[in-house]
Amino acid sequence: TDDSGWELWTSDGTETGTVMVKDIRAGSAGSYPSGLADVDGTLYFIAGDGVHGTEFWKSDGTEAGTVLVKDINTNGGSSPSGATNMNGALYFAANDGVTGHELWKSDGTEAGTMLVRNISPRDQCEQDPHEEACPRLRSLTNVDGTLYFVMEYAEWHDDAPQLWKSDGTSSGTVLVKDDFPRNGAGYYPQYLASAFGKLFFSAPPTSDGGSTQLWISDGDHTAMVHVNNECACAMDPKEFIKANDTMFFQAWDAERGVELWKSDGTAGGTTVVKDINSTPGGGSYPIGLTSVGGTVFFAIDGRNGKELWSSDGTETGTMLVTDGYFEGSKYITNMTRVDSTLYFSPRVDLFGTSARELWKVVVEDEATPGDTNSDGAVNIEDLNNVRNHFGATGEGVLGDTAPFDGKVDIQDLNAVRNNFGAGSASPVTTSSLRTSPSRRRALDGTQPLETSDATAELAWLRAWEEISNNFAWPKLRSTK
């Protein structure tokens, strides 16, 4: 505001519920909050109060609960960046004025905010006349409890960019790969993203540089994904987003131009989703990829300006959402997921005036009873998920699918059986579940089901009935 400048605000979606949290820097100068990150319900952000320089703050949404975490650099601010939640702790890069730009972590307290490891001792950097020659951390990415990040030097420095990983300890912060070429003035690796317990990123081939390609690392093995040795495919990948069991991204090839691609982490499973702009080499340039309820939304350059599209990962399931709504739109930006709703902001030039509005798309959950991995079907994977997941907690009762009456009975078992599609056409009965010991084979807690035959199905249903009385499985309940 004119009185307080740029400060931290909160909103419940109403005018009266939209208020400033705290005037961190008193007066009209403003503290310019940025880099907001949620760590288990606590909001961390970067701000400058005019006294301590730019440092990390935290907030519980109240004025009293909005406080400085730690004055890391007492001589002008540590300029923190890259706030990332890993295992309930905040990880970030900061410069304390002594060790240089290094990896830090915080539990939200001053005493619990500390340097993880001094990777590049500052005295080595000071031998170079350029301060920028000291390495800088960027692209902090949490991959299932392992933090990956990039250490890079200035363009004129001899050292190549380096990929590192950390478990949050000094000894567990180690180099992964250090021979990435610069490819001109570019800094690589870029666009780090997590899926399937692996790190996806973009970088040039290490042999001779050239155009960037898709790379994958599990921390021990790091390699480029060779989609097709006979063509220049999936070049310059970016805009990575995971939805269900697929990694989506934007990439270029000579035949189609820039289009939407997907990958399951293998060369054979890395392919273009759809050639939206069928003009040879044209490309639709999908941007703003955002996952909502397993559907990926993105904006493209369409016939009438920017258009909103969605995809389920199949060619037929990749379709236009907003045909003609934003005719003349130059941008569709700020695509953000809030629960099952996509919010976005198109900008349209109307009568010589640039207008921007807030729009939303609500994605309904069409959950299938027994569909534990949300792939739209009940199959052997779901059956084993339930059988193996003893001790799970959550809302609802395991197996209570039809109706949601708080118990598991024959009606529920038949609801899942009908979706599963195995066995005879006759409904399951109490007697058919209990009579034959052979129908309860392979359910001793060690052996997974391997087939979808009738006896295996009935045995699983019996086991499900037995364990459902004590354990919950929230995904088995529809949230539509």
Image (cartoon, helix red, strand yellow):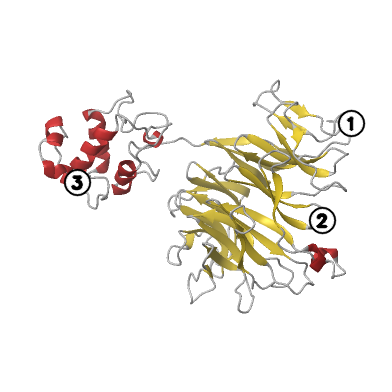
Q: Residues within 10 Å of mark 3 (few under 14, many from 20)?
A: many
Instruction: Identify which amino acid the numbered label 3 is placed on.
Output: Ala
Residue occupying the point 68% across, 30% down: 60
Residue lying furthest top in this view? 16
Instruction: Give the mark nearer the N terminus: 3 vs 2.
Output: 2
Q: Residues within 10 Å of mark 1 (few under 14, many from 20)?
A: few
In the foreground, 231 or 33: 33
Residue occupying the point 76% across, 63% down: 121
Q: Position of residue 80 (x, y in %)?
A: 75, 49
* Foreground disc of the pair 2, 1: 2
The residue beneath circle 2 is 98
Residue lying furthest left in this view? 435
The residue beneath circle 3 is 456
Q: Position of residue 336 (x, y in %)?
A: 61, 41
Q: Position of residue 244 (x, y in %)?
A: 46, 48
Instruction: Give the mark nearer the N terminus: 3 vs 1.
Output: 1
Left or right for 126, reference 232: right
Distance between the alpha carbons at the discs numbered 3 and 2: 65 Å
